[in-house]
Image (spheres, rainbow, N blue to C red):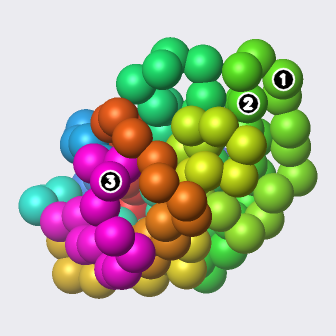
Amino acid sequence: MTIFKNGIEMVDAAALNTKITTTTRDMTAGSGNVSYTGVGFDPTAFAVSALHSNGTDGSMSFVDSNASIASTFSSNGGALGGGDSTNVAYLQTAGSVVQQARSPSFISGGVTLTWTKTGAPAGTGYLAFQFMR
């Protein structure tokens, strides 16, 4: 099905896809690249919600087709911060003890994120992705 606006073809609706997936991040894992695949199509944008197992620290990010982080906010013990255009996911356990994901790159069937571990974080990070094309 083709979607039209004012008589102009905007997009082929059959080409639109979205998929929601969930995963975890072991907070004790070292720094490095992690690929999230199995989407079933090649995404061109995604949103990700990240929450630490302490239940109070997390982030929400939107990444566009240029792999630019469009908007991010994070919560540190309930205090909201915003305007972070560097981190895709930010999981803080205390002070500067964090796992943060940066440098998104789209790959076949998913995305690769570069994780950086600072300090000795513990617990589990929970991530929910919404991939789009």
* Proximity of marks 1 and 2: CB atoms separated by less than 8 Å: yes
* Proximity of marks 1 and 3: CB atoms separated by less than 8 Å: no
Q: Position of residue 65 (x, y in %)?
A: 55, 74
Which quarter of the rendering shows the C terminus? bottom left
> Is residue 37 visible in the rendered structure shown here?
yes
Range covered by the magenta-colored residues: 26-37
Q: Residue at x 86, y 43 (%)?
A: 82
Q: Which amino acid is tagged 1? A: Ala
The answer to which image quadrant residue 67 occupies is bottom right
Label 2, secondary structure: give it.
strand
Please give left or right for residue 127 compared with residue 6 in the image: left
Residue receiving disc 2 = 76
Residue receiving disc 3 = 28
Instruction: Check disc 3: other Cα within 10 Å, few if <14, some if 14-19, many if 20+.
Output: some
Return the residue nearer the eye: 5 or 87.
Answer: 87
Q: Residue at x 48, y 20 (%)?
A: 54
Return the residue nearer the eye: 65 or 49.
Answer: 49
Looking at marks 1 and 3 on the same chain, the residue that comes earlier in the sequence is marked by 3
